[in-house]
Amino acid sequence: MMTIIRAVPVGIGHYLPERIVPNSEFEKMLDTSDEWIRSRSGIEQRHFAAEGQLTSHLAIEAAKDALADAGLEAKDIDALVLATSTPDQTFPSTATKVQAALGMGASFAFDLQAVCAGFIFALANANALILSGQAKRVMVIGAETFSRILNWDDRSTCVLFGDGAGALILEAQEGTGDVSDRGILATELQSDGQYNDLLYVDGGVSSTQTAGTLVMEGKEVFKHAVTKLAQAGEAAMNKVGVTEADIDWIVPHQANLRIISKTAEKMKVPMDRVIVTVQDHGNTSAASIPLALSVGKKRGQIKKGDLLLSEAIGGGLAWGAVLIRW
Ligand code: UT7
């Protein structure tokens, strides 16, 4: 029988900062309401990092949770890919700070930036590292402190985002080449820089030498999201010949409950097969999918052998999907 290498999930974990901010807190400082935020986005609360609590700190806690879940130690991991748009510093990479704090041995670590699609891009890269033999065990982290780049005077964006981190450990294992294999079965990545202006941060190292704050044409991004997410999901499934009926769980980027449900509807997957955490976390950008995977597993929803389809879209625009058997 033919054997091939697959990147198989062996551990998942997450971390959320202690401070929980309910929608009602925004009513005190902005012309908004809990009712508007809930009905337009599905968000009820989000977590915000404490002063001095950095993206790397959230990532380290999520990584420890994933290592415990896998029954592995940091020295067992030979590569770390960290997706973030809110790094601790311009450089070095936040990934190398996590690498040092965990006490990983001979290994390499780097950051990857594809905004809200960051975890999908990181998974595809980790998969490629494993399939090409460059790494045997890869820690893939999505970690963000979006609270640091929000414009607190812009009610149309600052109520939508939150902080958090999730981590997934992938391991090279032999498979048969069939879709019954555990591990990453297909990846689909897309971006289109024509849409840079729909979602961006108005600062940066080379332009303003400041971090800047987030600007979004919400309605426009919303329209692109539903079509492009469904298309990316279909493309990933078509690559290996599976259909919606085979999917046990959609684990989508958690930006807006209406985007999640409209995409599921377009893909003809009922909402009882969709992992939803946006009500508790808000939009945590690159952290939202690993957070949803970890919470979905801890809730007892995601089980070994389940077929998962994850999809995400964000600034760029950049979007994509990953099909993975848990
Ligand atoms: O993760 C990266 C990708 N990002 C996304 O996927 C986000 C995509 N977009 C969205 O989720 C939605 O477009 C939003 C949640 C951002 C907005 O929902 P919407 O249904 O598209 O609302 P809208 O922007 O059309 O705004 C409707 C109204 C406006 O008032 P007028 O112009 O109709 O009088 C806004 O000024 O709601 C107003 N509004 C608010 N009202 C109360 C906007 N923000 C608020 C607010 N509270 N916080």
Image (cartoon, grey):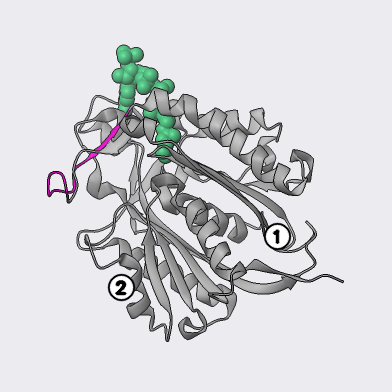
Q: Residue furthest left?
A: 209
Closer to the camera: disc 1 or disc 2? 2
Q: Residue at x 76, y 63 (%)?
A: 181
* Mark 2: secondary structure: helix
Residue 209 counted in the magenta span: yes
Q: Are marks 1 and 2 in contact (CB under 8 Å)?
A: no
- In x, y percent, where is residue 69? 57, 73
Q: Is residue 62 above or below residue 235?
A: below
Residue 208 counted in the magenta span: yes
Q: What residue is pinned by disc 2? A: 97
Q: Residue at x 24, y 41 (%)?
A: 150
Q: Residue furthest right?
A: 1
Q: Earlier in the sequence, mark 1 or mark 2?
A: 2
* Tally of numbered discs: 2
Q: What residue is pinned by disc 1? A: 303
Crowding at dot 1, Cα within 10 Å, few <14 / some 14-19 / many 20+, comes out as: some
Crowding at dot 2, Cα within 10 Å, few <14 / some 14-19 / many 20+, comes out as: some
- In x, y percent, where is residue 74? 46, 81
User: What's the amino acid at mark 2?
Assistant: Lys
Q: Residue furthest front?
A: 132
- In x, y percent, where is residue 262? 58, 28
Label 1 to label 2, Cα distance in Å? 32 Å
**Image-quadrant location for residue 71:** bottom right
**Residue closer to the observer: 16 or 110:** 110
